[in-house]
Image (cartoon, rainbow, N blue to C red):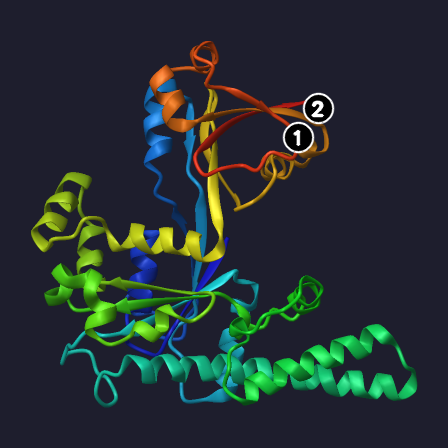
Amino acid sequence: MQTGIIGLPLVGKTSLFRVLTRARVDAHSAPTQMHVGIARVPDARVAKIAEVFKPKKVTYATIEYVDIGGLQKDREKNSASLVPLREADALAQVVRLFEDPSVPHEGPIDAMRDIESVEIELMLTDLEQASKRMERLEKDLKKRKEPLLETELQLLTRCRQALESEQPLRELEFKPEEQKMLNGFMFLSRKPMLYVLNVGDEEAAEINRIVEKDHLEKLTAKPHTAVVPFCGKIEAELAELSDAEAAEMMQAYGLAESGRDRLIQASYRLLGLISFLTCGEPECRAWTIEQGMSAQKAAGAIHSDIEKNFIKAEVVNWEDLLKAGSFPAARERGQVRLEGKEYIVREGDVILFRHAG
């Protein structure tokens, strides 16, 4: 899974990237330079099961983050810098809410103005792409009438009308066949959006009330969006500390969990993702799949041959397995279920796949 980090200049995008990926970014790098890094998805279940099974290897699920740098007052440059985000599954827009005289900002802090400014850039890029394709379709349809091309033109006409009305495509409802047709365009304003509200450290204790406090409730009502308040300055300090020191610092600020963990978990929920686990002597591992996926499809996350030659899945809840201490002990307790290919995998399932490979 890949998430693109966007926003205006000097809002804390690269700081967020460093916190999420633990990557070292050159402080003197150009503000428009792109960075790519991998973040480990926090999962206490993997660590606890690994303590029991003592595998040779422990592997967590991961998310790739792409930081493209700040958007400028230049349509041509912005259009070029946004291209790498077409491959992203979701976007995370960092929104400045902190006051800091040492970090310049044009005009007063205004979250909604900044959000709309970035959204317009995304929509203009999509509008340009849709218009070019429509011109080509209209030329082709003059030569020959083809139902599929006519359907595509009608769909893009609807998209263009929404974009011209400053409505991002993620707010539109599409039928499954329309979604399939649109997937190839990789429209930016259609991607799920995570708003990361970067607040000052003096507001850390009230971080769960930021949305209400700053009158940003309408963000939470938007379809295919999520909102996560985040204190970039504190999180940057936490990233440099040991687990024990970080826990002590969070307690001092009244934080129940790190913003990094909250942001990654919000990304999962936004994209409708869950994790199932596999464990044994060689490896304990978390696997990311879409919510509602069948056991046979989930097996494909491990290897296509396991999906193809799927027979059955032995399934046990991770807490039951932890208490039992092993798969054989859980079987004796009647906690391991034998499920077929149509079984819908649940969050926290530990699965042993039987296959004919």
Above or below — where is 143 with respect to 340?
below
Judge whether residue 137 can be spotted in this image. Answer: yes
Q: Amino acid at mark 2?
A: Gly
- Mark seen at residue 171: none
Horizontal side, residue 276 vs residue 322: left or right: right
- Mark seen at residue 357: 2
Of 227 and 82, which appears nearest the observer?
227
Report which quarter residue 24 is drawn in. Answer: bottom left
Give the spatial CA distance, label 2 vs label 1. Answer: 7 Å
Of 245 and 138, which appears nearest the observer?
138
Judge whether residue 25 can be spotted in this image. Answer: no
The answer to whether the residues at label 2 and label 1 have Cβ atoms under 8 Å apart is yes
Q: Position of residue 189 (x, y in %)?
A: 52, 74
- Mark seen at residue 306: 1
Above or below — where is 50 with respect to 272?
above
Of 319 and 246, which appears nearest the observer?
319
- Which quarter of the image is occupied by the C terminus? top right
First along the sequence among labels 2 and 1: 1
Report which quarter residue 310 is drawn in. Answer: top right
Q: Amino acid at mark 1?
A: Ile
Horizontal side, residue 349 vs residue 42: left or right: right
> What SS does tag 2 mark?
loop
Above or below — where is 96 with respect to 51?
below
The residue positioned 50% from the left and 74% from the top of the image is 82
Above or below — where is 72 with respect to 200?
below
Horizontal side, residue 208 vs residue 185: left or right: left
